[in-house]
C-alpha cells in the first residue's frame, strides 16, 4: 500500500493516496496507530465484551449490547451493503484492512493495553457498522419513553408536558449558515459545534483525505471510514445537528415459555415463536464470574428489557400489572439492514450542494438536520434520515405489541427548511424536523445565535468564536422572576437576591454571580424533587442500569425547571416558598469568592479510569451552561461538573478553505503522553480555533514505517 502521511503543528493527519481504496486503507491504518485503544474499546462495545477487560462496571452496557443484538445488526447491514452497493462495501473493507495493519503498532504505543492485559483483536468488514450503531443506538433517546410511562403512571398524561425537553435544556448541537450576502467575502460560512459526552480520546477525529477524486477535510468518527458529519471539500461544505426526530419504538410484549422455547403474542391474537438463545459474558477481576444473558427477539425487535415468566405462568397484561414487563426495541437499521453507509462515498465526492443533497437521500441513522453551502452560492437546509410512519402513541410511550394499530406502515419524507435573511440556524429546536419528533430542545440557543448573527451586517470566518463562546443564559428568567417577587427577606438573602437581579445572566467561569445563581437553582431543584407530588418518581422500576440516566428524578426536575416554574399550577406546590428556602440556604452556605468555574469543571469519560485518583489530570473550570450557545451541561441539583460540551468546533469558509478553523477538546492523538494528546485543550477552553492547513508544503511529512505493519 502506498500513501503519503503529513501532519500539521497539532499532529492532525493529512493523507494522500493514488485511489479511493488506498486512501481508505491509509485512513484505517493511521487511525489505528493514533487511537488503537479507542478503536478496540469500540470493537468490544458492539460485541458486548468490554467487561472481559474493564470489569464488572462495564456489564450494563454489555448486557444491553447483547440483548439489542448490535453485532448481528452490524453484520446484517454489512451483508446488505455488499449486495446493494459493492463499491462502498469494498471501500469499507479497505478501511478495515488498514485498521488491522496498524493496530499492533498502535497497541504498542497505548499503555492501556498493557494495563488491562488486552491484546488487539481483528476487525471484521462489519466492525465499522457496529461502531456507528453502538455510537448512535441511544442517540435518539428511546429510554425517554420509559420516563414518560412513569410520569403517566404516577401523575397522569397531563404531566408529561411538564418534563418535556422543550422546557429543559437538553444538550444537542449548534450549527449556523451565513450566506454570501451576509459575509465580507461574498461566500458562505458554516460554523457550529456538536455537543456530546466528552470522551478522552475524543469522539471526533480531525483528518484530511486526498486522492485524485477528491480532497476533503473534516471531523471523522474513529472506526468509520470517510467524513460523514462535518466536512469541507473545497467547493462545498456541510454540517449536521441532531434533528430530535423520534424513530425508535418500544413495544410492551406478552411472552410465554413453552416446552419448545419462547413465544410472543402478535397483534392478530396468535402466539408465535420468538427466537431465543443464551450468551455468556466474561468478566475480568476478582469478582469476575461469567454472566449469562438470554437474548430474545420478537417480530417487533430484540427484547431489551425483561424476560418471559416461568413456564406455566400467565404473562402480565399491561404496565399496571407489571411495569417491568418485557419491552422490545424496533429501530430502522434492524428492520432495513441499512445504516446509511451508502451516503459516505458520495459525500466525499460532492462538488456542489446538489451532490450533498443527493448523498443525504441515502442517509439513515441517526436522523439529522443538514446545512450545506457551495462556492456557486448554493445552499441546503434539510432533514436527513429514516423515520417510520406509525401511530402517534408509538412516539410517546411503550405501546402494546399484542394490539393492532402500532405497526410501521412506511417512511416519512424528510422535510426541507428555508433560510431567513441569509441565515439558517439549527440548535435542536423545533424547525423543519418538527413533524418527525416529540420533544425538542428549547429555543434559547437557536434564538440567541440568530440574534447574535443579526447584530452585524457582515461576518467573517474569524468572527465565529464570538458565537461559539457566548454565555448568555436566557433560561434563567423564570427563576429570577420568582426571586424578584419575594418580599420580607432577611438581610443576607435580600442582598443575594439583589445581586442576582443585577447579574448580566452570563455563565462565565470567573463569575461569582453565575456560581450563586447555579447554587440557588440546585437548591431549588432538590426541594422540588422532594415534594410528595414528584417524590413518587424517585424510585423507578428496576429497569436495566443502562437506562437509569433517563429515569433519574433530580436531573429530570433540573432540566424541566423552566416548565415547573411557569406552569399555571403545580400540584399545589408552594413554589414561592421553595424559592425562598433555596435562596436562604444559598445565602447561608455559599462560600465567599466562589466562581462558576470552581465547581463547573470538565468531567470527561474514560473507558479505563486512572488507577489512583491523583493520576487523573486536574480538569479545568468551564464557562457556559446547558442553554448557552457555549453549551457545557451540568446536572442542576446533582452536580456542577460538565460531562457534555462541545466535542469539536468548526468554521468552514467557502471563500478560502485555508481560512477555515477547527478544534477538539483534547488533541489529535489518543495516546497518553503524546505531545498531541491534549495540546488543543488550551485553545478549546478559550474559544480559540486551530488553523486548517491546506498547503501540503506547510505540512510535515511523516515516514510511513512499513515494518510496523502486521502482515498475514
Image (cartoon, helix red, strand yellow):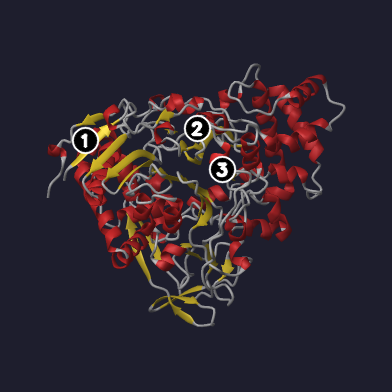
Mark 2 / mark 1, whichever is N-terminal: 1
Q: Which percent across, then down, holds residue 218? A: 39, 41
- Quarter of the image with the N terminus is top left
Residue 114 horizontal side relative to residue 372, left or right: left
Q: Can residue 694 be seen in this view?
A: yes
| The one of 248 and 352 positioned closer to us in this rendering | 352
User: Where on the picture, by quarter, is residue 118?
Assistant: top left
Whether tag 3 and tag 1 are in contact, CB under 8 A, the answer is no
Alpha-carbon neighbours of circle 2 within 10 Å: few (<14), some, or many (≥20)?
Answer: many
Alpha-carbon neighbours of circle 1 within 10 Å: few (<14), some, or many (≥20)?
Answer: some
Q: Which residue lies furthest to the right in this view?
A: 488
Q: Calculate the distance from the C-alpha at mark 2 to the C-alpha at mark 1.
A: 40 Å
Q: Is mark 2 on a helix, strand or loop?
A: helix
Q: Is residue 74 above or below residue 203?
A: below
The residue where tag 1 is placed is 108
Q: Is mark 3 on a helix, strand or loop?
A: loop
User: Where on the picture, by quarter, is residue 79?
Assistant: bottom left
Q: Calculate the distance from the C-alpha at mark 2 to the C-alpha at mark 3.
A: 25 Å
Q: In this view, does 469 lie above or below 312?
A: above
The residue where tag 2 is placed is 461
Mark 2 / mark 3, whichever is N-terminal: 3
Q: Is mark 1 on a helix, strand or loop?
A: helix
Q: Is residue 64 visible?
A: no
Q: Residue 375 carries which label?
A: none
Residue 505 horizontal side relative to residue 253, left or right: right
The residue where tag 3 is placed is 171
Amino acid at each position: 500500500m502506498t500513501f503519503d502521511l503529513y501532519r500539521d503543528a497539532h499532529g492532525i493527519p493529512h493523507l494522500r493516496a493514488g485511489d479511493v481504496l488506498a486512501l481508505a486503507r491509509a485512513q484505517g491504518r493511521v487511525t489505528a496507530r493514533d487511537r488503537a485503544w479507542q478503536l478496540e474499546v469500540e470493537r468490544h462495545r458492539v460485541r458486548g465484551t468490554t467487561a472481559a477487560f474493564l470489569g464488572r462496571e462495564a456489564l450494563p452496557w454489555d448486557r444491553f449490547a447483547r440483548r439489542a443484538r448490535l453485532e448481528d445488526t452490524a453484520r446484517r447491514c454489512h451483508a446488505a451493503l455488499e449486495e446493494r452497493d459493492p463499491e462502498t462495501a469494498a471501500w469499507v473493507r479497505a478501511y478495515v484492512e488498514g485498521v488491522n495493519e496498524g493496530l499492533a503498532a498502535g497497541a504498542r504505543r497505548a499503555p492501556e493495553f498493557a494495563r488491562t492485559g488486552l491484546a488487539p483483536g481483528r476487525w471484521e468488514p462489519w466492525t465499522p457498522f457496529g461502531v456507528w450503531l453502538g455510537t448512535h443506538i441511544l442517540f435518539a433517546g428511546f429510554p425517554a419513553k420509559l420516563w414518560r410511562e412513569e410520569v403517566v403512571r404516577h401523575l397522569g398524561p397531563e404531566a408529561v408536558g411538564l418534563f418535556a425537553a422543550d422546557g429543559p435544556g437538553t444538550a444537542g448541537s449548534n450549527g449556523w449558515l451565513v450566506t454570501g450576502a451576509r459575509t465580507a467575502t461574498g461566500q458562505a460560512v458554516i460554523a457550529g459545534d456538536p455537543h456530546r459526552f466528552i470522551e478522552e480520546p475524543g469522539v471526533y477525529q480531525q483528518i484530511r483525505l486526498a486522492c485524485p477524486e477528491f480532497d476533503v477535510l473534516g471531523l471523522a468518527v474513529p472506526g468509520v471510514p470517510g467524513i460523514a458529519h462535518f466536512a469541507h471539500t473545497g467547493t462545498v461544505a456541510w454540517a449536521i445537528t441532531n434533528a430530535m426526530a423520534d424513530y425508535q419504538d418500544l413495544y410492551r410484549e406478552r411472552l410465554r415459555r413453552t416446552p419448545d422455547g419462547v413465544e410472543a403474542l402478535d397483534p392478530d391474537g396468535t402466539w408465535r415463536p420468538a427466537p431465543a438463545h443464551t450468551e455468556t459474558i466474561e468478566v475480568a477481576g476478582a469478582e469476575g464470574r461469567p454472566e449469562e444473558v438470554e437474548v430474545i427477539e420478537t417480530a417487533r425487535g430484540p427484547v431489551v428489557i425483561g424476560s418471559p415468566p416461568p413456564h406455566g405462568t400467565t404473562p402480565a397484561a399491561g404496565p399496571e400489572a407489571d411495569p417491568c414487563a418485557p419491552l422490545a426495541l424496533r429501530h430502522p437499521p434492524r428492520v432495513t439492514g441499512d445504516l446509511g453507509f451508502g451516503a459516505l462515498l458520495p459525500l466525499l465526492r460532492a462538488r456542489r450542494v446538489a451532490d450533498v443533497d443527493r448523498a443525504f437521500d441515502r442517509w439513515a441513522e441517526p436522523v439529522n438536520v443538514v446545512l450545506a453551502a457551495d462556492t456557486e452560492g448554493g445552499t441546503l437546509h434539510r432533514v436527513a434520515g429514516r423515520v417510520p410512519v406509525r401511530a402517534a402513541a408509538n412516539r410517546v410511550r411503550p405501546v402494546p405489541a399484542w394490539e393492532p394499530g402500532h405497526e410501521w406502515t412506511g417512511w416519512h419524507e424528510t422535510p426541507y427548511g428555508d433560510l431567513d435573511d441569509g441565515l439558517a440556524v439549527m440548535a435542536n429546536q423545533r424547525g423543519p424536523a418538527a413533524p418527525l419528533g416529540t420533544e425538542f430542545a428549547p429555543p434559547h440557543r437557536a434564538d440567541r445565535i440568530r440574534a447574535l448573527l443579526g447584530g452585524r451586517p457582515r461576518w467573517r470566518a474569524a468572527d465565529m468564536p464570538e458565537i461559539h463562546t457566548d454565555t448568555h443564559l436566557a433560561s434563567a428568567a423564570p427563576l429570577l422572576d420568582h426571586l424578584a417577587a419575594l418580599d420580607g427577606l432577611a438581610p443576607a438573602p435580600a442582598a443575594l437576591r439583589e445581586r442576582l437581579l443585577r447579574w448580566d445572566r452570563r455563565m462565565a467561569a470567573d463569575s461569582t454571580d453565575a456560581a450563586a445563581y447555579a447554587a440557588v437553582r440546585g437548591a431549588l431543584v432538590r426541594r422540588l424533587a422532594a415534594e410528595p407530588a414528584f417524590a413518587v418518581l424517585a424510585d423507578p422500576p428496576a429497569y436495566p442500569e443502562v437506562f437509569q440516566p433517563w429515569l433519574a428524578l433530580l436531573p429530570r426536575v433540573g432540566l424541566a425547571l423552566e416548565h415547573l416554574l411557569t406552569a399555571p399550577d403545580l400540584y399545589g406546590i408552594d413554589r414561592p416558598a421553595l424559592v425562598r428556602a433555596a435562596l436562604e440556604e444559598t445565602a447561608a452556605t455559599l462560600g465567599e469568592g466562589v466562581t462558576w468555574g470552581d465547581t463547573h469543571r470538565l468531567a470527561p469519560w474514560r473507558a479505563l479510569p486512572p488507577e489512583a485518583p491523583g493520576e487523573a489530570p486536574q480538569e479545568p473550570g468551564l464557562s457556559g451552561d446547558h442553554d448557552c450557545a457555549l453549551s457545557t451541561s451540568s446536572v442542576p441539583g446533582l452536580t456542577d461538573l460538565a460531562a457534555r460540551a462541545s466535542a469539536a468546533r468548526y468554521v468552514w469558509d467557502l471563500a478560502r478553505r485555508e481560512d477555515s478553523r477547527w478544534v477538539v477538546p483534547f488533541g489529535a492523538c489518543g495516546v497518553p503522553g503524546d505531545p498531541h494528546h491534549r495540546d488543543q485543550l488550551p485553545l478549546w477552553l478559550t474559544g480559540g480555533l486551530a488553523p486548517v492547513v491546506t498547503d501540503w508544503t506547510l505540512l510535515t511529512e511523516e515516514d510511513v514505517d512499513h515494518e510496523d505493519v502486521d502482515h498475514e
